Structure formats: structure tokens, C-alpha cells
Amino acid sequence: MKPAIPSGTRDFSPWDVAKRNYIFSVLKETFERYGYQPIETPAMENLETLTGKYGEEGDKLIFRILNSGEFFIDFLDEYINKKYFSNRSRPVSFKESFSNITLDALKKYLNTYNIVLDVKLLSSELTKFVSEKALRYDLTVPFARYVVQHQHEITFPFKRYQMQPVWRADRPQKGRYREFYQCDVDVIGSNSLLNEVELLQMVNEIFGELLPAINFSIKINNRKILKGFAELIGLKDRLEELTNILDKSEKTGVEKTVEELREKNLAGESNIAQVKQYIEKNLTASGSNEKIKYLQELFTGSPDGVQGLQEIDFVLKYAENLNIPVALDMVLARGLNYYTGVICEVKPVAVTLSSSICGGGRYDDLTGIFGLPGVSGVGVSFGIERIIDVMNELNLFNKLSLTVSSSKVLFVNFGPAEEKFCLPLVSTVRSAGINAELYPDHAKIKKQFEYADKKKIPYVAIVGSEEMQSGMITLKEMKTGEQKKMTVEQMIQELKNSL
Amino acid sequence: MKPAIPSGTRDFSPWDVAKRNYIFSVLKETFERYGYQPIETPAMENLETLTGKYGEEGDKLIFRILNSGEFFIDFLDEYINKKYFSNRSRPVSFKESFSNITLDALKKYLNTYNIVLDVKLLSSELTKFVSEKALRYDLTVPFARYVVQHQHEITFPFKRYQMQPVWRADRPQKGRYREFYQCDVDVIGSNSLLNEVELLQMVNEIFGELLPAINFSIKINNRKILKGFAELIGLKDRLEELTNILDKSEKTGVEKTVEELREKNLAGESNIAQVKQYIEKNLTASGSNEKIKYLQELFTGSPDGVQGLQEIDFVLKYAENLNIPVALDMVLARGLNYYTGVICEVKPVAVTLSSSICGGGRYDDLTGIFGLPGVSGVGVSFGIERIIDVMNELNLFNKLSLTVSSSKVLFVNFGPAEEKFCLPLVSTVRSAGINAELYPDHAKIKKQFEYADKKKIPYVAIVGSEEMQSGMITLKEMKTGEQKKMTVEQMIQELKNSL
């Protein structure tokens, strides 16, 4: 048997863990500096908590967990009972009535009770029956579930962060995994736009720490602006389709976008000029102020548009005061349907990856589905794996003095007497807070040095018969080959100085 | 819909997360001080990686993940094709041949091709078909899989630690969950007993930090001692049964243990005296040395016994030199079949919980099943949830100055002008490394103070029109009610001093 892991999943070796932990710690420290607190939810949720929240496509990508037991015969039995014997009692179940359970036995049983079994219906019922739990698909829905379930313990506005893996039965491809982490930070129970500003402040601080400023851009928009525009051009009922196409317009260009809108009957003689102008303005305007002026004129008759514009204006002004480089992107839509207000997105710049590395927005009624209506929330989510991809491409981990946790010193093991002598010494070194180890086997010295070299242990302590007599340790620096004799106290000082 | 989570799983609120993180950090720091490095493996493994490794009972407790798709009709079609058409071609599949897929249609199809379908066989095949992946059941088997898969990148001896959740379809009860963390630390690729000593040293250091010394005990034994004893009394082939009963003898007492051995035909006239003496010696001996003397006499003719005794003697002597309080427990067995050498267990003392909070041992050939034979490993596993239960009972978290990460200061929000004035001040405070937040809404002051109180934020900064004019901030300490006016620099100093 050749060992392997499921496609779309990954093992993380010590160096991978070090990179990931570094990013987690930057996020965690920033979140906490802004007063956000951590929560964690289970990997598995009840199926009904998740289904219906991510659209039809999303539902298909949820990993379901199989109920235990050899379930088919049991299911068939229960299914038949429920569907065909709900109004009459059955003297004996299918399972009990035949010692040899064949299709003929089943047929005979069904004939006895005059039942016509629909295999297609059975199939879809079976899928439901065999699974009642599923793996977390994102952190937002479990968070909404958490807020409702724990509403009486929570002080609102509730500022929480959550960094946990999610699972999606997506087709695996470069940069897309079936198991990956989401790092979410949300405020729930406050309508104030200050929350949007604060989130942007954190986003800017975090990426400012992780990436050079030229390598990321923060864009914002408002769902209400998109809604206002759709109303204006008579496409109120086709908002989703319109915004999906607009969202890509920066990439595809004005002409192709208009073409696609025409193909889908979203642009006709009456509104084509306005759509073109909207897209062009977004591409060519000198800055957010010019866009706002344009939208102010455009939206005179649209309450949604005006409201959206006011919100964006507030956020942009506050961001400017706080030196957060945020730009209005009038076509930015973000995919998720539950967003209702300001939305934002961070994209990497001047690297291979072009998809977003962070995004979020305001959702006005996410907890409503779980029975707690009228609670507004806003949050952003950071994509760890993509951030790592960008940092790898920019060679940033090497510029950080990031190291794999490793011993600072390896005590060579010459044999039984020496190892006995060394053990308390190693303990003393560790008590001083220095990572240290004694090679466990009486292996050839060459092999032990190779071990230190490969594990990037910078110092080797040599304690042979001579050192045992003198009580002095020979400390060798691996990089220079330099050797010095010293007491254990001197060694601790030397190792501390080199940290 | 009333929100809920699957039974046996838990949400962790900020205070729970703080407790758990504290224990994780003690473990992590100790592991790293001893030169162990972190790895992580995916939550889901291929089903064949896990099945057959945990015994029949264990296999039943593995959570399987459902393949996606409406699978029953597809499965039926494939099943029929594979089983009945492997030697002949079929002109049309069952799925294609009927627009209306009923059991009668299936029957007709089967009749056409002269097929008798066994529903029972179908049922067991179906279980296999619908699931190819499963959730991690422990960390040891994924670690063995990892070592074999990455053997060419690894420098042996490989010292790794791993702290991740595992899932078991066990019946939930107090202290037993369906999702829980394991924290494993192992050395693989070294036969040296120094590894056993080092692990015991870490175990002692970790519990010494987490618990008072009187509240835990470390016991060790050797599977070879148990094997030697079983051989000696003619029960070589019934080692597992024998050790399971011996393992409980401390609780059940000598008489009941002997009774149970008799009931299961494990003790007769020929060996009853020896078994009794063995159990009694374990209960009454004044210390490990007396037990060793007893075993030395007992094992003169048993190579396994002698070998096991030598190993235990080595470990005990080294442990004594290093002041690790370890006691030999001749009946300690540990459940897992893959252990072959020294085993150990930590139990809480003088608290409600009596089950182990840490355990492990040496396994001589765990990677063999994945194609890498002859690699010996040894490791221990820490049970986070049980450690927390014990610490809760002893009220230890309150004695630690453990706090939920929370803001140090809340800026009260009096209105639009004040919030604008405050935002850069909050930024300045945060830049000094102090967790701080501005209340996002223009809520009543009483509500804002209640928020600070409930969130345990120790200071409130009051900036009204007066403070805006003077440039001085009023800082109020929540506990004492004391108020002082100061500049933002003075405030930062004050808050830092109070940390």
C-alpha cells in the first residue's frame, strides 16, 4: 500500500507550519489589539444548519458525514414503513420476513402489500437518510448559528475572530484546496459605519505588515450603489446577473462587457449608453472623488443609490483621515448573496495571483435564518493559503528572520558514560530557556553532525572523556567550524548572545 | 429552526479558547525546548489508511465522509455492470433503459439479463462505495502515513509534535466527546531508551507546570514484562485478555481479579498462586526496586521478561538521576495493540476524574503497514479536555493570571464630532501595543459602561467637548471608579504600568 492523502488536502511539514503560524500570529495580534475575541466552532455542523445557505452550487460542495452502521437494508425498511405503512400497520417488516434478502424477496414483500417502489425517489431520500452531519463550509454560517445559540451569554456589539479550517468538495486545482483555513473577523449587533472603517484599518495594518505596500490594493463598494444603478437602468430584477458581469469588466474591458450584457439581454438601446459610461467612468476616473461626483448626479432619483453613496462617502472620508489607502470600485460586487451594504476586497498587485486575498462586507440579517432577526453584522475574511502564495512569490519569508523551531544546540552522544554525564547538562541548558537536545543513539560522529546540519541546529556541544574530566564543554559553531572550550554557564551565555 | 450542534461536539467561547490556548502553549514550548518540530496532517484521510488499524471496535467509530452526488442509481448501475457484466458487454445500462426508474423497471432489466440481485451484499458494497474518505481517528496512524510518504525529506531520528482535533463516533458522555484534541509527541527512527527518558522528562515538566505535584502520578511498565509473565504462566496466546484484566486489578482488588480470571479460564490450579502473587506484589511492594527484584527472580527463564526488565531498569535509573518521579506498575497495559516496549501513563490524583490524562509507549513497527518496516518509534499523547477538567476542579485557571484577550481601554462614543476626534487617539494607543477600541455606536453612556464592565475592559477613556477643547483625556478605572485627566502619552504610560 502506497501512502497518500485525499486530493485537495495537504500535509504541513515544520517549515510550512512556521509560515502559517507566522501569518496566524500577525492576524491574531492585530485582531486582539482592536478588541476582538476568539471563538471556535465544531468541524461538523448539523446538515440543516448548512444546507440552503450557500446557493444550489454551494450545497453540492458540502462534505457530508455518513451515519454509522450498515445502513441500506435498515433504510429500505424504514423508508417502506414510513412511506407505505403510515396509515396501516404492517404485521412484519421486510428485514424480518426474509432470512435471505434478495431482490426477489423484496419484490415478493412489495407485491404482498401492493407497493410500487420509485427507485429515483428512493435514491434522493437515501442521500438524506445516510447523512445528518456535514463539515463546516465557511465560518460565517456557523458564526451566525453560534450568535443565536449563545445570544444570552454574549455582550453586543460582539467582536469576534475565528481562524479554523473549512472543507469544500470543489475540484482541486492550483491554489484551490478541499481543506483550507479561513480567518474571519466580524462585529455583530452594531449598525455603525465605524465598524467598516475599523475593519479597513485592520486590513491595511495586516497587509502593511505582511506585504510591501505596492503589492496590494484595497477596494470598496456598496451593494446599495449596485442596486441603485440596476434600478436606474431598469434591471432591478436582474441585479445578480448584472453585477456578475460588471464585476469582471475591469479584466474584460468595456467592449466585451457590453457585448456580454447584450447577449444576455441586459443592455438594450434604452440603457446601453449609461452602462458604458458607468464602466468607463470606473476605469478612467482620476480617483474616488470623481466617481462620487458622477454617482451623485446619477442617483438624484434613487433612494438606494443615495443611501449607498452616503455610506461610501463616510467610509472614504474616515479612511482618508486615518491614512488608509482605499479606492472606490463601482463595479466590485463580491459573490455572496447575503451582503447588503459596504463591501471590500483586497487584491495582490504585480504578482501571478490575481484573485482576492481578503474580502468581506456588511450583511443585514444573517442571524434571521436561525431565529434572531434584525441584527446587522459586518466582517472580513483572510485567505491564508493565497497570502502565503503571494509571500512565497515575493520571497518574503526569507527576508523575515522566520525560522523553523529547532534546537539551538545538539549534544553529541559518544556512548553510555558520556550520555549519562550529558543528560543533566542538557537539562540545565533547557532550564535557561534554550532549545537543546542530546542525540539519542551511539551513532557515528559523522552521522550526528549530519543530523545537526540537516536540522539546521547552529551549535554542537562535544563532551568526550577529556571534557568529562575537565568539566569543560567543547562548543562548535556549525557555520564557521569554530570550536571553543567553556563551562556550561559560559555556554548558556554564548548561546543566548547568539539568539 | 432552533440552532444546535451535533451531540458530542462543542462551541468554544473566548474564555474556553483562552484556557485551551494556555495548555497548548505550555505543551508547544516544552516540546520545542526538547527539539521537537510541529507537523500537521489533513482532517480527512483515505479510508484505507485508517481502517484495520484500530481493531474491529475502532473501525466502527470512524466517521466516514460521503462521496458527493445522488449516488444510489449510479451505484446500482455500476454495481450491476461490474458484478454481472464483467465477462459480457451490455447493450444498454439500467439507468439509460428506463425513463421511469421504478423497482419494476429494475426487475424487468434484471430479468432480461437473468440476474439475481442479493440485497444484503448490495448493502455492504454500498457502504464502501459511498465513502472513500474518513475523518482522522487519532494522530498516530496519520503520523506513520506521513513518515512513510515523506521519508526522503525527513532527517531521522525524527522528533515531531502534532496538536490537532480527532473525531470518533463514540457515544457522547461526560468527558467524552466526538470531536476532541490530541497532542502527540513522538521520536521515530531511534531505538535508544534515552527517548523514553526524555519523554518522561517532558511529561513531568509539563504536568509540573500545569498541576500541583500531589495531583498527578506517572507510571511505567513494559509490554515485554507482561509478555514474559504471560509466557511464564502458560497464557502466551491469551496475552490481550490477561492484560486487560490485570490492568484493572488496582481498582477491582486481588480477589475479584482472580475471580474474573477464573471465569474466563485464564487461571487454574497450575498458575493461580503466581497470578495472585504478581498482583499482590504490585499492590503492596514498597517501591519500584522491590518489584524489580521480584521480577528478576521470576524471569530467570524468560528472554522477553529479562529484556523488558533491563529496559525498565534503565529508564527508572535515568529518571531517578533526573529527579523524575516515575513508578513501575507491573499491571499497567495501555489498550493499543501496537505498543511493544516501555509504556507509560499519567493519572490525576485526588480529583474526581480517574482516567488517564496522558499516555504512550514504544511501537516497533507502525510504519510497516505503509511499506517502511523496521523503524521503531516512541511517543506520548496528552488529553487536553481531561487536563482542563482536572484544572477546573482544582480551580487552577483562576490562580493563573489567565485572562481572555480583551481591550485594555474603551473610548466612549459621545457622537459624530467626538468619534472623529477619538479615532486617531485610539490608533496612537494601539500603536503603543495596547489593545483598545472605540464604542461603535452613539449609544447611551450607561450602555457603553455596561459593555466595558461585561467585557472586563479595565479602563474607559472619556472624551467629550471639554476634553476635545483641552486636549486632555479623562481616564476612568472601572474597578475603583477613580478618574484622572491626562494627555494621550500619559495615558499610554498609565495603561502600560498597569499591565
Image: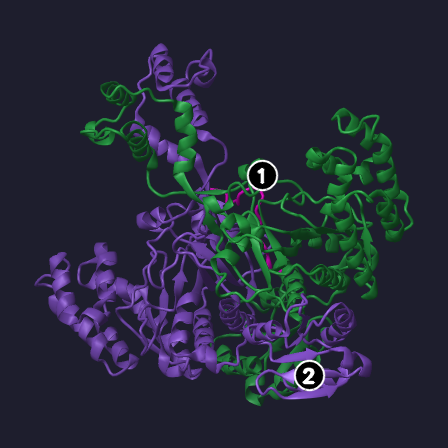
Chain colours: A green, B purple
At x 85% / y 43%, what residue is drawn?
A282
Q: CA distance from mark 2 to mark 1?
A: 49 Å
Quarter where residue B392 is shown: bottom left
Q: Chain of mark 2?
A: B
Q: Amino acid at mark 2?
A: Leu
At x 44% / y 67%, what residue is drawn?
B384
SS category of the residue bearing label 1: helix
The mark tally for this picture is 2
Q: Is residue B35 above or below residue A332?
A: below
**Magenta: main secondary structure:** loop
**Residue at image mark 2:** B475
Quarter where residue A175 is shown: top right
SS category of the residue bearing label 2: strand
Which numbered dot is residue A323? none
Q: Residues within 10 Å of mark 1 (few under 14, many from 20)?
A: few
At x 54% / y 50%, what residue is drawn?
A368
Range of magenta residues: A1-15
Which numbered dot is residue A55? 1
Q: Is residue B12 above or below residue A244?
A: below
